[in-house]
Image (cartoon, helix red, strand yellow):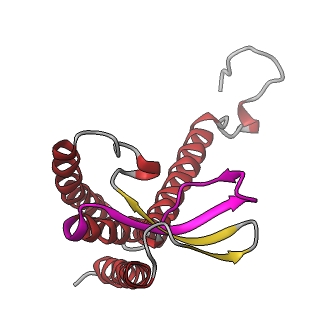
Amino acid sequence: MKLKYLILAAIAGAVITIDQATKMYVHTHFGLHESIEVIQGFFNLTYVRNYGAAFGFLADSHQTFREIFFLSMPPVALLVILAILRGVLETDRWQIVSLSLVFGGAIGNYIDRIRFRYVIDFLDFHIQKKYTWPAFNIADSAIVVGVSVLLFLELTRTRSSSTATTTPPSSDSSNQKGSDEPSTT
C-alpha cells in the first residue's frame, strides 16, 4: 500500500476517534444547551445540536431536503478527496496531511448524521458572551485546518508559478550593444 494512503488512514482515523470520543462524552454527560465555563469570558463547553451545515447553514430548510442532502453529499465529497489524493505525489506531504484532515472530519460529522440526523457541537468561543462564534467540534476543526492549508498551498503554488513566468529572461552580455538595435552576431 502506498504511503499516502497509510497517512490518510492514520490521520483520518485519529481525527474520527478523537471527534467521536469527545462528542460521546458531551452527549452522555451534558444536557442539551448545558454549558460549562472553561476560560472565563472566552471559552465554554456547550452541548448544541446542529441540524444544518457550517454555522447552521440550511438548518431551517425542510427536514426531508436536509436529510437527503446531508446523507448524500459526504460520500460524494469523500470520493472526490480520494480522487484528488490519487493524483498527489508521495512527496507532497502537506497536501496529503491536509486532505487526510478533511477526510477524517467529513467522516466524523457523517457518523453523527447517520446516528442522530444532526451533528453534536460543543466548542463554544465568545468574548464576554457578547461576540460569539457558532459552536463547533473536532471534526469541524480538522476540516477548517485542512482546507486552510490546501488554500495556502494553492495560493503559494499559483504565486510562485506566476512569478516564474513573469521573470525576465537572463541577459546574455554577448548579445547587448547598449542600444535597441538588433544584434548582428
Stretch of the chain drawn in magenta = 114-136
Out of 169 and 10, give the one closest to the viewer: 10
Q: Is residue 37 above or below residue 87?
A: below
Residue farthest to the top? 181
Residue 33 in percent (x, y) is at 48, 66
Residue 116 magenta-highlighted? yes
62 up-or-down from 137: above or below: above
* For residue 3, above or below residue 63: below
Give 116 or 171, whichever is nearer the viewer: 116
On screen, residue 154 versus residue 9, left or right, reads right
Residue 99 in which image quadrant: bottom left
* Residue 174 occupies quadrant: top right
Q: Image check: 160 left or right of 77?
A: right
Query: Residue drawn at (33%, 72%), measured in percent from left and top?
Result: 108
Q: Residue at (35%, 72%) from the top-left corner?
A: 104
Q: Locate residue 12: give its quadrant.
A: bottom left
- Give left or right: position of 2 versus 45: left
Q: How many marks?
A: 0
Which of the pair 127/90 is nearer the observer? 127
Residue ID at (72%, 51%): 130
Q: Is residue 70 magenta?
A: no
Q: State the image coordinates of residue 16 (x, y, percent, origin top left).
A: 35, 79
Give the x, y percent position of residue 88.
34, 63
Query: Relative to 6, does residue 91 appear above or below in the rendering?
Result: above
